[in-house]
Structures are given as C-alpha cells and as structure tokens.
C-alpha cells in the first residue's frame, strides 16, 4: 500500500494538472517544474560534485530526484514522505527533518545512505557544503519537578541559523539549532537559551557560544559564562549538546519542595 501511494504521487507530479494545483503555494511554478524535470533526468551530478539524489525505494531504487546545494531548505510537498535512500555528492552534506518547518526527528547524511527510513518520513532537507558542522541540542529537566519545562533556542545570525528549536523535557530527539562552517575562522555562532514553564513563565534567559575546535568539531567557546545559572550543558557526542535544567530558581538555588 505504501509503495503504490508513492507511485501515484509521482505520476501526479509529472502531470500538468499537478503543476497548476501546486503553483498557488510554491515559490514559483517554473522552479518547481524544473525540479520535476530532475526526477525524469534521474541522477544528475554537477561539475562541483555538490547536491544529493534521493530515491523512492531503498538501495537507490525507484524514482529519483536531484537537489542542488543551496541556502534555502527544501520543503517536500508532493513528494513528502517519499524517499527511502540518498546519495550525497562528495562536497555536500544533507541536514534532514521528519516534518515541515524543520521539525521532528533530525539526521545528517553524507555519501551513500541505502536506507533512510529511520527519519520516519522525510519532509524537509537542507543541502550544505560538507564542511558545515551542525549544532544539535536536546533539553532535559533534572530538578525532579512535576512541572513540564521546555527550552526555546535559536541562532539569530542568518548565516548560522538552522531552525527555531522548541524542545520540551520529554522530547527524546536531537534538534538542529544552527551550524558553523569549519573554516569560519574562529567566529562563534551564538544561540539564545531560555526555559519556560507550561504557563509560559520564563525561569531563565541566556545564551551559548559555539565554536569549531582544533578537532574540527563544534564545542562551547565561552566556558558557559552566558548560560543561565540554573542550567548546565554537556557535550554528549560529536556536535551534540545536552542542556539540563538543574534548578527551578533562576539563580540556581536548590529548593526543597517536599520538606
Ligand atoms: Ca514527514
């Protein structure tokens, strides 16, 4: 059933009727039509060895569509949840999201990826140079409180911004808040950090500075000087930063709620 639905979607995508239907809410019918033509052309490699070719079946089978490297993310509409494998050209990297607007599960791909179903239905991609390092974050509450806290974080600099991350304590997935080119020349990327309770009350406000280290990976650059006092951040993997709430008080005091 899953395969036949995808095939129907692709047939529709090749029809003029779909072009008319789609033109009303896309960035331009011409650009969209060009992208459809890329499905027909199958794999197309640029001179610069950039871009990525996605396939509707695993192991690079089925219909394919080539995506050029570009600054803007691609939102998949008619081919939403359609791709199951990808070949990324050697000078590119793919940032991939499960949902539209860079939401849900997040993964990064380079080279050959014969099965990308772990993403849970691909809906948004961004094709960047392969020396871009993504900054992945997650939030947990270590206070033991019954309150459900969520962290709001974003990179405001357009060159380093990936998505506005709103991560609640029960969200188990890593989210991409921003990225840094490894040749950034020591310039840090800054993200805002703020945690709020379910009623919208903020219990802290600060920021984190990320920088490329000698090892070519992302690290915190400012010894957490700008992190809120009731937070700590731990590097738990390559380019992965786990933010923990350690007190419900903005100054970091431990409060015994059950004396
Ligand atoms: Ca999806």
Image (cartoon, grey):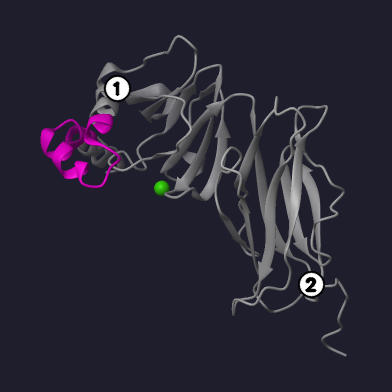
Q: Which residue is mark 2?
A: 143
Among the 4 quarters of the image, the one containing residue 161: top right
Query: SS at mark 1?
Result: helix
Q: Residue 53: give x, y in percent of width and height.
A: 41, 23
Residue situated furthest left in the rendering: 17
Residue 106: mark in rendering: none
Q: What residue appears at the point 46 percent right and 25 percent down from the top-left corner?
A: 69
Q: For the residue with label 2, is its CB less than 8 Å from the closest atom of ligand 1? A: no
- Confirm or deny contact between disc 1 and disc 2 (CB under 8 A): no
* Left or right: residue 163 compared with residue 251: left
Residue 38: mark in rendering: 1
Q: Residues within 10 Å of mark 1 (few under 14, many from 20)?
A: some
Query: For the magenta stretch, what is the residue range?
Result: 10-32
Among the 4 quarters of the image, the one containing residue 86: top left
Among the 4 quarters of the image, the one containing residue 13: top left
Q: Residue 178: give x, y in percent of width and height.
A: 62, 43
Q: Is residue 113 magenta?
A: no
Q: Main secondary structure of the magenta part?
A: helix
Classify the position of the C terminus by image quarter: bottom right
Classify the position of the N terminus by image quarter: top left
């Amino acid at each position: 059933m899953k395969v036949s639905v995808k095939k129907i979607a692709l047939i529709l995508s090749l029809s003029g009727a779909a072009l008319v239907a789609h033109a009303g809410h896309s960035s331009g019918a011409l650009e969209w039509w060009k992208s459809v033509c890329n499905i027909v052309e199958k794999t197309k490699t640029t001179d610069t060895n950039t871009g990525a070719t996605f396939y509707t079946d695993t192991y690079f089978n089925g219909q394919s569509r080539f995506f050029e490297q570009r600054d803007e993310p691609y939102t998949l509409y008619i081919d939403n949840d359609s791709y199951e494998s990808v070949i990324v050209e050697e000078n590119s990297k793919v940032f991939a999201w499960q949902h539209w607007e860079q939401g849900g599960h997040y993964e990064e791909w380079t080279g050959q990826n014969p099965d990308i179903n772990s993403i849970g239905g691909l809906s948004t991609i961004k094709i960047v140079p392969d020396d871009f390092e993504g900054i992945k974050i997650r939030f947990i509450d270590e206070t033991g409180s019954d309150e459900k806290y969520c962290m709001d974080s974003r990179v405001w600099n357009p060159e380093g911004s990936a998505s506005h991350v709103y991560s609640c304590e029960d969200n188990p997935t890593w989210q991409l808040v921003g990225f840094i080119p490894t040749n950034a020349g020591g310039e840090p990327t800054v993200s805002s950090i703020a945690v709020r309770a379910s009623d919208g009350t903020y219990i802290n406000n600060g920021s984190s500075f990320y920088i490329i280290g000698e090892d070519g990976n992302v690290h915190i650059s400012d010894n957490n000087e700008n992190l809120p006092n009731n937070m700590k951040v731990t590097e738990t993997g390559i380019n992965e930063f786990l933010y923990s709430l350690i007190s419900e008080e903005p100054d970091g005091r431990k409060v015994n709620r059950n004396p």
